[in-house]
Amino acid sequence: MLTVLDNPLVRRDITLLRDKTTTPDRFRAAMQRIGTALAVESAKFLAMRTFRVQTPLEETEGYDIGHDVVLLPVLRAGVSLVQAFSDLMPEARIGYIGLSRNEATLATEEYYCNIPVLNPDSLVFILDPMLATGGSVCSTIERLEARGAKKMVIVSVIAAPEGVKRVENAYPNLQILTSTLDRGLNEHGFIMPGLGDAGDRYHGTV
Ligand code: PRP
């Protein structure tokens, strides 16, 4: 199920990301703010655990996170969301998966994979700012399922309808969160109007 996060601050920051004259430092700052908004919205997928807490005056109900939270950024662009998510979910464990897209075939190629041991309470947030063809996300989910993952949420910043459809068809019960749904993909598999290559722009490697 797709949720498109929409608020004026996020729209302003998406515009900054889109603008080709935005420098890497401003791109990173905008990504950080969008990441914070996405992390707050993502909290709705977290289960709660209740317990009794003693205030200075009396005992009352207290709350803690009921999931084992795992953040899984897809390298490289996913790095841009790690700080915001780990700030709001400090208990999270963090893994990494390195996938690159073969620009000729658009196929996904793995070059790194370090996923923490998962347990039945694990909720994995897959962090990848760009959901284009959906190949990277589907490859990541396959690897997570092979390690026993039962609960996953896909967090993107910018998504194409083609990628959303591919993921929804393959995994109808999965939650997808994004901050903008763009028009579609061009013939090279780039999101249009898009923002270019998030990994390159974030890391200043354009
Ligand atoms: C980009 C982007 C996503 C992926 C999306 O990665 O960061 O991971 O492509 O495309 P898909 O939905 O068609 O799989 P890229 O290969 O450019 O690597 P980078 O993050 O290192 O720049």
Image: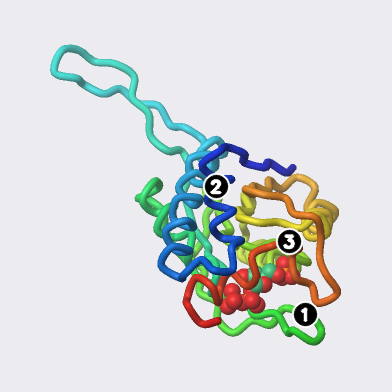
Q: Is residue 169 left or right of residue 113?
A: right
Q: Secondary structure at mark 1?
A: loop
Along the polypeptide, which appears first: circle 3 or circle 2?
2
- The answer to whether residue 28 is above or below residue 121 is below
Q: Secondary structure at mark 3?
A: loop
Q: Is residue 90 left or right of residue 105?
A: left
The answer for how far apart the CA atoms under marks 1 and 3 are is: 22 Å
**Number of residues whose C-alpha sits closer than 10 Å to that of mark 2, classed few (under 14), some (14–19) or many (20 or more):** few
The answer for how far apart the CA atoms under marks 3 and 2 are is: 15 Å
Q: Is residue 90 left or right of residue 141?
A: left
User: What amino acid is labelled 1 in the image?
Assistant: Ala
x and y percent of residue 157 in the render? 61, 55
For image coordinates 56% across by 38% down, the residue present is 8
Out of 195 and 148, give the one closest to the viewer: 195
CB atoms of marks 2 and 1 within 8 Å: no
x and y percent of residue 188 in the render? 81, 77
Residue 166: image quadrant is bottom right
Q: Which residue matches tag 3? A: 193
User: What amino acid is labelled 3 in the image?
Assistant: Pro
x and y percent of residue 12 in the render? 54, 47
**Number of residues whose C-alpha sits closer than 10 Å to that of mark 1, classed few (under 14), some (14–19) or many (20 or more):** some
Along the polypeptide, which appears first: circle 2 or circle 1?
2
Marker disc for residue 12 = 2
Residue mark closest to the camera, 1 vs 3: 3
Along the polypeptide, which appears first: circle 1 or circle 3?
1
- The answer to whether residue 141 is above or below residue 205 is above
Marker disc for residue 107 = 1
The answer for how far apart the CA atoms under marks 2 and 1 are is: 32 Å
